[in-house]
Image (spheres, grey):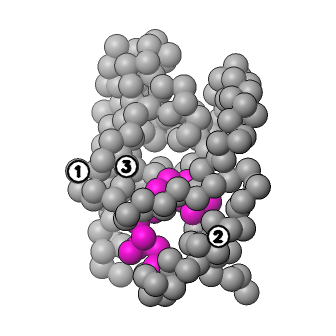
Amino acid sequence: MLSLSGSIEAVLFASAEPYEKKRLAALLGVSEKELANGLEELRGVLVGRGLTLIDTAHEVELRTAPEASELVKKLREAELSRDLGKASLETLAVIAYQGGATRSEIDWVRGVNSGTSVRTLLLRGLVEGKEDANDKRRIHYTLTTEALAHLGLSSASDLPRYAELSLAAKQVVEAAAQAASEA
């Protein structure tokens, strides 16, 4: 059985993005005061480690510790020198054919956690994230002009079978959203 601080760490690590405190407390089934104590314990556990806890008034996030910045810089340089992998290309395709997508939509379509792929695409400037118009707590990712240039396209609609696959992707996501709301 995980401790509260361990549970918080797991959720923040898996989400790979800021998490609203109220939502985190509800997920873990604890009060806001218990959550604050768990966050304080986690902060103490992370001292001298490679991660740090970023804590704002409403959100928390696990990030790389500032002391690891040189190491992370080397890692990013190495990442950027490699070709995009299959997972990143799949993620890029989901975003492209849906005309943009949230992390949960990408994960649902791919069937796996896409955090690393989204991060890679963000680092390379191939996608950008903005607040989702339907749910302000989520980020909606879209292609950048850099992505279109990387793919040799002038518009996402120039993708092979765009009209057909875009429509199919939207129908699948809408059906899943409706099924989730009915459950």
Nearest to viewer (mark 2 / mark 3): 2
Residue 74 at what x, y percent from top left?
A: 74, 27
Residue 62 included in the magenta stretch of the image = no
- Dot 1: what SS? loop
Residue 174 at what x, y percent from top left?
A: 30, 58
Which of the pair 51/119 is nearer the observer?
A: 51
Left or right relative to 32: residue 67: right
Residue labelled with disc 2: 42
Residue 133 disc label? 1
The residue located at (29%, 50%) in the rendering is: 132
Which of the pair 24/162 is nearer the observer?
A: 24
- Dot 3: what SS? strand
Residue labelled with disc 3: 139
Q: What separation in Å lies between label 1 and label 3 (alpha carbons)? A: 9 Å
The residue located at (38%, 25%) in the rendering is: 144
Q: Count neighbours of disc 3 (C-alpha within 10 A) and say few if under 14, some if 14 to 19, many if 20 or more.
A: some
Main SS category, magenta section: helix
Q: Count neighbours of disc 1 (C-alpha within 10 A) and say few if under 14, some if 14 to 19, many if 20 or more.
A: few
Query: In this picture, which residue range is highlighted in magenta?
Result: 12-25
* Mark 1 and mark 3 residues within 8 Å of each other at the beta carbon: no
Task: Give the amino acid type for the residue marked by disc 2 in the picture.
Answer: Leu
Using the image, determine if residue 127 lies above or below residue 180.
above
Q: Quadrant of residue 128?
A: top left
Q: Earlier in the sequence, mark 2 or mark 3?
A: 2
Q: Quadrant of residue 9?
A: bottom right
Task: Give the amino acid type for the residue marked by disc 3 in the picture.
Answer: Ile
